[in-house]
Amino acid sequence: MRHSFAFLARIHSVKLIPVPTPPLSRIWRKDDPNSSKVHFFTSHFFSTLDDEGPESVSSWTAKKNIDIFNKTFVFIPINESLHWSLCVVVNPGHIMNEYADDDEQSADHDFPCILFLDSLKAHRKKRVANKVRKWLNYEANRLKKFEQNPEPFNHKTMEVFDPKSK
């Protein structure tokens, strides 16, 4: 699916805001995980997902009764081969917007995507994105979300964006 130039310009013009004191980890832990619009996983999450599949990490959200489809951002840090990268799942709950007719879509609707931040381009973004999409489909089926489409997350409905070097 192609997105409007205006939307892509918004994605590329996002300004990062300095984290206030106390540290972000303390702010996040004080928030109710169910009402927060942001969720942070540890780097062990992706390692387990990669090695053992989505079934092995389903308890990470199930035990805490966290619905990732209500989140705006899901942060998944990746540590492989002595290098860090970050995968950010944006608006996973809005996946059905991608199945609406082009006439029904507006250029400004919130659409799901994956932001992949890897300064050295050492990790293969397609492999990471495919693992994350597979996990999202597993979670959607576990929670009985989007029942009209058992595998709503794919490379056409959830694109991967990565910053380009100048």
Image (cartoon, rainbow, N blue to C red):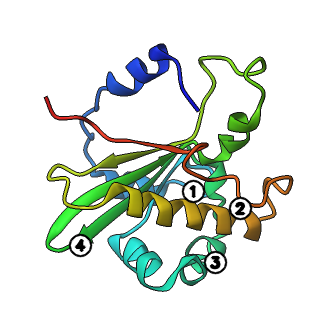
Q: Nearer the viewer, residue 117 or 149?
A: 149
Instruction: Say whether disc 4 or disc 2 marks the residue closer to the N-terminus.
Output: 4
Do residues under tags 3 and 1 come within 8 Å of each other at their CB atoms?
no
Location of residue 110 (image quadrant):
top right
| Residue on which disc 4 sits | 80
Compute the Cα span from label 4 to label 1.
31 Å
Q: What residue did someone put label 1 on?
A: 32
Choose mark 2 or mark 1, whichever is in front. 2
- The extreme right residue here reads 148
Residue labelled with disc 3: 63
- Quadrant where the C terminus sits is top left
**Lower sequence index among marks 4 and 3:** 3
- Looking at the rendered image, the quarter that the N terminus falls into is top right
Residues packed near mark 2 inside 10 Å, few (<14), some (14 to 19) or many (20 plus): many
CA distance separating discs 4 and 2: 27 Å
Question: Helix or strand or loop: what does disc 3 sit on?
Answer: loop
**Which circle's residue, 3 or 1, is located before the other in the chain?**
1
